[in-house]
Image (cartoon, rainbow, N blue to C red):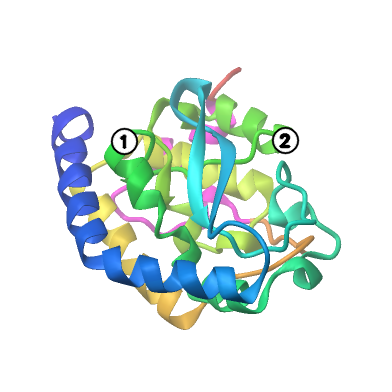
Amino acid sequence: MYQHFIKRILDILGAIIALLILAIPFIIIAILIRMDSTGPAFFRQQRMGKDGKPFRIYKFRTMDQEAPHDLATAKLDNANKQITRVGRLLRKTSIDELPQFINVLKGDMSMVGPRPVVLTETELIEMRHKNGAESALPGITGLAQVNGRDRLSNLSKSNYDGIYVSSISFFIDSKIMVKTFWYVALRLGIREGRPNSKKVNAANIGEKNIRPNEQQLFLKRKA
């Protein structure tokens, strides 16, 4: 009931409220981006969506026009050099992600879910497929984002995503949202460019509402 109906209603209401509140800040941010560097204020990129269907994600542009458009930031060797001055602030505060409320309103994304990955991240896509992570709408934030974010290895990210999709509930979504504000406020887990990823065992997540058999889900799912 929650996953297939109530969650979507809350997403729509949340996205509408957020976009109304952020309308003027969006205009100001867009102007600052255009003043800071050449190029559009918004960045659009193909990402993997629910059931493996690609969709176009919206973000504020934070990198110069020379940066590859089809690669994840973690795959870039000189990411810091390609991030603009305004873009650096937007990324540190996660403000660059706010246009994704448009994706939520369109039905491409949810407030909470596995983060949508770039189509070239084939290793992570395959791992998530094995864990069933594609069965849920991707989210603005997710379980992996409040348990390490950019510092996680692909294996750990897919583990968290697999656990989340088999444990979706209002309580878990609410807890992830609260932890997201904490992560953003303290700028936790942010890493630009190729990471030194830490591996996280799913059994160490500490989510009391996830049953042990669900914690080991990533070991049991088959392609």
Quadrant where the C terminus lies? top right
**70 or 31, nearer to the observer:** 31
State left or right for residue 16 relative to residue 38: left
Rendering quarter of residue 79 = bottom right
Is tag 2's residue or tag 1's residue first in the polypeptide sequence? 1
81 versus 98 height, above or below: below
Magenta region: 200-220
Q: Amino acid at mark 1?
A: Lys
| Secondary structure type for disc 1 | helix
Residue 160 among those drawn in magenta: no
- In this view, the mark in front (2 or 1): 1
- The residue that mark 2 highlights is 120
**71 or 122, nearer to the observer:** 71
Taking the view exactly as shown, the residue that stands out farthest to the bottom is: 186
- The residue that mark 1 highlights is 106
Residue 63: x percent and y percent? 68, 63
Rendering quarter of residue 165 = top left
98 versus 209 height, above or below: below
Residue 153: x percent and y percent? 68, 53
Quadrant where the N terminus lies? top left
Q: Residue at (21%, 66%) from the top-left corner?
A: 21
